[in-house]
Amino acid sequence: MIAIYPGSFDPITLGHLDIIERGQKLFDCVIVAVLCNTNKKPLFSVEKRLEQIRQCTQHLTNVKVDSFTGLTVDYAKLHKAGVLLRGLRVLSDFEKELQMAHTNKTLSGKIETVFLATTTEYSFLSSSTVKEIAQFGGEISHLVPKNVAKDLCLYYSKSH
């Protein structure tokens, strides 16, 4: 079965990577799908985020990386995926994710949402938190893959 792990991944964190690594053990293929959301102003371009994700998942043979626009369920149908994979950190994530899962179910009754609880070590972690720490020169090497830490340090060194 194919699973889609959708998100903005701006940037990908070790929490995201944890979900990808655990998910690829459960499914035949996991497609990490970067959503091109015109309502958000991402730090990194879609192309850069795809490159970052490809670099840190290259050791996972059944993980593919792609981008999409539009509805996640339409993307899932296009790729014949039966599952949307989502990570849960805290209770507020659950409320939002459950609402989204119910909405997606009304759009396509054939696609299920599977939630993986984030490893405790990463339960506090978000892309926004990482960007804020990096912006002020804080240590982020324990929060993101090495290639992403380099990109963030480079980005914020140029913006100051």
Image: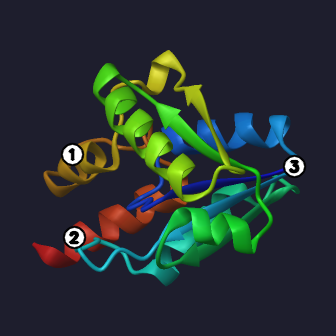
Q: Is residue 80 visible?
A: yes
Q: Could you say which is closer to the camera, residue 125 or residue 113?
A: 113
Q: Position of residue 114 (x, y in %)?
A: 64, 35
Tally of numbered tags = 3
Q: Position of residue 101 (x, y in %)?
A: 49, 42
Q: Quarter-wise, where is residue 61 in the image?
A: bottom right
Give the residue displayed 30% in from the left and 41% down from the top. 139
Q: Amino acid at mark 3?
A: Met
Q: Could you say which is closer to the camera, residue 147 or residue 65?
A: 65
Q: How is the image coloured?
A: rainbow
**Residue on which the image places disc 3:** 1
Dot 3 or dot 2, earlier in sequence: 3
**Residue on which the image places disc 1:** 133
**Quadrant position of the C terminus in the picture:** bottom left
Q: Tag 1, which secondary structure? A: helix
Mark 3 vs mark 2: give the one in front: 3
Q: Amino acid at mark 1?
A: Ile
Q: Amino acid at mark 2?
A: Ser
**Residue on which the image places disc 2:** 157
